[in-house]
Amino acid sequence: MRWRTIVLPVAALIVGTTAGAAQAHTDSGAPVTPYYAPPFADECEVHRFGEGEAPDLSAYPDDPLCVEYAKRDITVDNGGALAFALAEPARVALAAPACQYWQRDHWSVQFSRGDVPVVRWDGSYWFDKGTGQAAGRLRNLTVGGQPAGIAEAARAVEQVSPELAAYLRAYGRGGSGLGADAGVPLDPTCVR
């Protein structure tokens, strides 16, 4: 398929850039690890939001703030993409003031209902401004219905850059996603 000749190298570039950034942080002394759940996970009351649902910014003062978003209907033909676009600014704004935040979401982008998704994944991202820790991962990533992980990205770039392909393969052995620890609070008012 023609889209694979475009999308997979772009995905590989994004993954490679992320991996390179992780390596640079490791080289500078900031610990970078495979993804791990937030230390505050046991304190979470998870607030779940449906397709295109924008949270009320004044209704969730929780800290830690833990949310789960359904984003499987980012579809053009039924207005799902528009509903997603209208809800997303409030979702981002909800996260900004939290000291401890964990978001899980489930994405699927397609042109029409019933189409094979252009891209689909499940995400988990969190931060703790008081400790300087953060982590994120994508799981179950598919592009055009085909699995698109580190191994596929490495194969896609191997002809152009064997070095990047080798790095991606080595990076992929570290687990799903990344965790990082700045070693200092990112916001002193969030220290507990």
Image (spheres, rainbow, N blue to C red):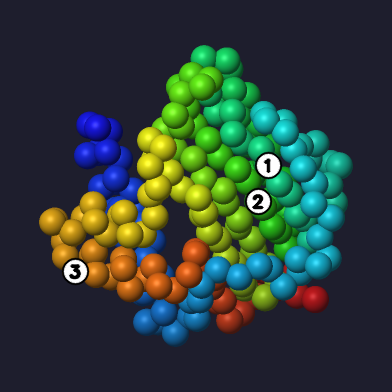
What residue appears at the point 67 percent right and 29 percent down from the top-left corner?
Answer: 52
Q: Earlier in the sequence, mark 3 or mark 1?
A: 1
Which residue in the protein does label 1 denote? Answer: 69
Q: Could you classify mark 2 by the number of other residues whose Cα lies within 10 Å: few (under 14), some (14-19), or many (20 or more)? A: some
Residue on which disc 3 sits: 163
Sequence order check, earlier mark of 2 and 1: 1
Q: CA distance from mark 3 to mark 1?
A: 37 Å
Callout 1 amino acid: Tyr
Per the image, label 2 sits on a secondary structure element best described as strand
Considering only vertical position in the picture, is 110 above or below 91?
above
Q: Residues within 10 Å of mark 1 (few under 14, many from 20)?
A: many
The reply to whether residue 129 is visible in this rendering is: no
> Mark 3 belongs to which amino acid?
Glu
Image disc number at residue 104: 2
Query: Which quarter shows the N terminus?
Result: top left
Q: Do callouts 2 and 1 mark residues in contact (Cβ within 8 Å)? A: yes
Q: Secondary structure at mark 3?
A: helix
- Is 60 rendered above or below residue 158? above
Residue under the image location 77 percent in, 55 percent down: 65
- Residue 46 location in percent, x, y? 80, 52
Please give the label number shown on residue 5: none
